[in-house]
C-alpha cells in the first residue's frame, strides 16, 4: 500500500501556543500571570466562542482583558509570551456585561473552523475542550463529592475523597478505505441529506482496542468490508465536544458492501474519475476543513501519476 503523507497541517493543528505545562502547579505564578496587564482571556458562553471579524469574513478569536467578575480560569499557556486563560460565562444571562467585547459576538466555532488562523484555532480548540471537560466534571465519579479546579484548571479534585480527575479526550479513528484505484466512501444518516456528500468512515476507539483494530472493526461494522493493512496519516483535535480524530488509510481485502442501515444511508466504491466529476454526477465531498477531506484530497494527489 502506498504511503501518503499529509499535504498540509489539519485545521486546529500547527498553532504556536506554548502550553507551559510546568507552570500549572505554581499557584503564585498563575495568580501573577492572571493579574498581568498583558494577560488575555478567551471567553466562552454556552459552548460558543467570542469571535470578531465576522462582517469582513475574516473571523478571529477576540481575546479580552481580565473580566470584571471573579471566575475560575484555565491557564492555556503563553501566546507570543503573553499568558492566555480561558473562562466560561455560560451561567451569565448577559455575558457581554463583564467584558469589553468590541464588535465581537459569541459564535459557533464549527461555522468558521476553516477560516481561523492556526494560532487562534489552537487556542479556541484547547479552551473549548477544557471548559467542556470542567463543566462535565463538577462531581466526583468515585464518591459523588463536589470537584474543584486545581493546577490552573488541569485537574478537578474531589473535595471529599481528594481523587484527582484529569482532562479527557476521546480517540476516534477516521479511515479512507481503498482498493487498487477505487475509494470506499459512505454517507451517514448524520450527514444532511440535501448536501448528498460522501465521506470516509469513522468511529470511536473502544477500551482494550488498538487503533488498527478499531479501523478494521468499524469498517466491517459499517460496510461489511474486510481491511488488511492500515497506515496512519495525521490527526486533528475536534473539540465538539472532546474528540481526537486519528486519520488512516486502510487497504480493503474484500469488495462486497453489506451496509449497516442503522448508521449508514449509503456507501459505495468510487473511481478517481467519478470523484473528479462529482459535480456533474450530483454528489459532494466533506468540507475542506475536515480531516476526512484531507484524506481524500491527499489520496487523489498521491494516486496521480500512477
Ligand atoms: Zn470523591
Image (spheres, grey):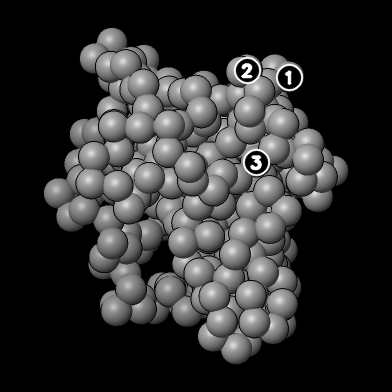
Q: Are marks 2 and 1 in contact (CB under 8 Å)?
A: yes
Q: Is 117 located above or below residue 163 in the figure?
A: above
Report the residue that reaches farthest toward the left.
Answer: 194
Q: Using the numbered discs, state the Cα–Cα distance from disc 3 to disc 2 in whole angstroms.
A: 14 Å
Q: Is mark 3 within 8 Å of ligand 1?
A: no
Residue lying at 30% horizontally and 47% vertically, measured from the top left:
92
Please name whichever residue, 118 or 178, is drawn nearer the observer in this view of the structure.
118
Q: Secondary structure at mark 3?
A: strand
Residue on which the image places disc 3: 75
Q: Nearer the viewer, mark 2 or mark 1?
A: 2
10 Å neighbourhood of mark 2: few (<14), some, or many (≥20)?
few
Residue at position x 61%, y 24% from top?
39
Mark 2 vs mark 1: which is more N-terminal? 2
Q: Residue at x 62, y 87 (%)?
A: 142
Which mark lies nearer to you, 3 or 2? 2
Q: What residue sits 24% from the left and 14% below the top?
A: 55
| Left or right: 130, with 24 as reference point | left
The residue that label 1 is drawn on is 81
Task: Give residue 41's position: percent from left, percent from top.
Answer: 52, 30
Q: Position of residue 148 (x, y in %)?
A: 59, 64
- x, y (%) of residue 282? 20, 41
Furthest residue in direction top, as rendered: 56
Q: Indicate if the residue with disc 1 has its beta carbon within 8 Å of ligand 1.
A: no
Q: Earlier in the sequence, mark 3 or mark 2?
A: 2
Q: Separation of disc 3 and disc 1 at Cα? A: 13 Å
Return the residue nearer the eye: 167 or 37: 37
**Crowding at label 1, few (<14), some or many (≥20) Cα neighbours within 10 Å?**
few
Residue 73 falls in which quadrant of the image?
top right
Judging by the rendered image, the residue that carries numbered circle 2 is 38
Q: Is residue 169 visible?
A: yes
Q: CA distance from mark 2 to mark 1?
A: 9 Å
- Residue 204 makes an appearance in the image: no
Amino acid at each position: 500500500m502506498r504511503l501518503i503523507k499529509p499535504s498540509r497541517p489539519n485545521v486546529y493543528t500547527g498553532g504556536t501556543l506554548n502550553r507551559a505545562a510546568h507552570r500549572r502547579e505554581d499557584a503564585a505564578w498563575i495568580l501573577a500571570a492572571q493579574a498581568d496587564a498583558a494577560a488575555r482571556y478567551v471567553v466562552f458562553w454556552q459552548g460558543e466562542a467570542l469571535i470578531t471579524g465576522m462582517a469582513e469574513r475574516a473571523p478571529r478569536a477576540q481575546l479580552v482583558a481580565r473580566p470584571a467578575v471573579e471566575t475560575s480560569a484555565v491557564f492555556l499557556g503563553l501566546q507570543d509570551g503573553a499568558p492566555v486563560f480561558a473562562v466560561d460565562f455560560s451561567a451569565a444571562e448577559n455575558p457581554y456585561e463583564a467584558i469589553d467585547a468590541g464588535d465581537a459576538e459569541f459564535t459557533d466555532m464549527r461555522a468558521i473552523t476553516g477560516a481561523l488562523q492556526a494560532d487562534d484555532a489552537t487556542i479556541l480548540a484547547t479552551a473549548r475542550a477544557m471548559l467542556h471537560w470542567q463543566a462535565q466534571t463538577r462531581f466526583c465519579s468515585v464518591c459523588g463529592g463536589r470537584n474543584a479546579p486545581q493546577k490552573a484548571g488541569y485537574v478537578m479534585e474531589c473535595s471529599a475523597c481528594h481523587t484527582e480527575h484529569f482532562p479527557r479526550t476521546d480517540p476516534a479513528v477516521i479511515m479512507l478505505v481503498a482498493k487498487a484505484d477505487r475509494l470506499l466512501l459512505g454517507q451517514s444518516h448524520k450527514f444532511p441529506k440535501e448536501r448528498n456528500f460522501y465521506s470516509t468512515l469513522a468511529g470511536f476507539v473502544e477500551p482494550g482496542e488498538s487503533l488498527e483494530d478499531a479501523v478494521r472493526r468499524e469498517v466491517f461494522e459499517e460496510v461489511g468490508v474486510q481491511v488488511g493493512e492500515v497506515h496512519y496519516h495525521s490527526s486533528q483535535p475536534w473539540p465538539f465536544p472532546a474528540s481526537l480524530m486519528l486519520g488512516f488509510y486502510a487497504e480493503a481485502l474484500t469488495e462486497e458492501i453489506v451496509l449497516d442501515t442503522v448508521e449508514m444511508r449509503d456507501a459505495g466504491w468510487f473511481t478517481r474519475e467519478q470523484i473528479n466529476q462529482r459535480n456533474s454526477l450530483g454528489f459532494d465531498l466533506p468540507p475542506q476543513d475536515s480531516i476526512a477531506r484531507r484524506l481524500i484530497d491527499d489520496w487523489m494527489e498521491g494516486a496521480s501519476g500512477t
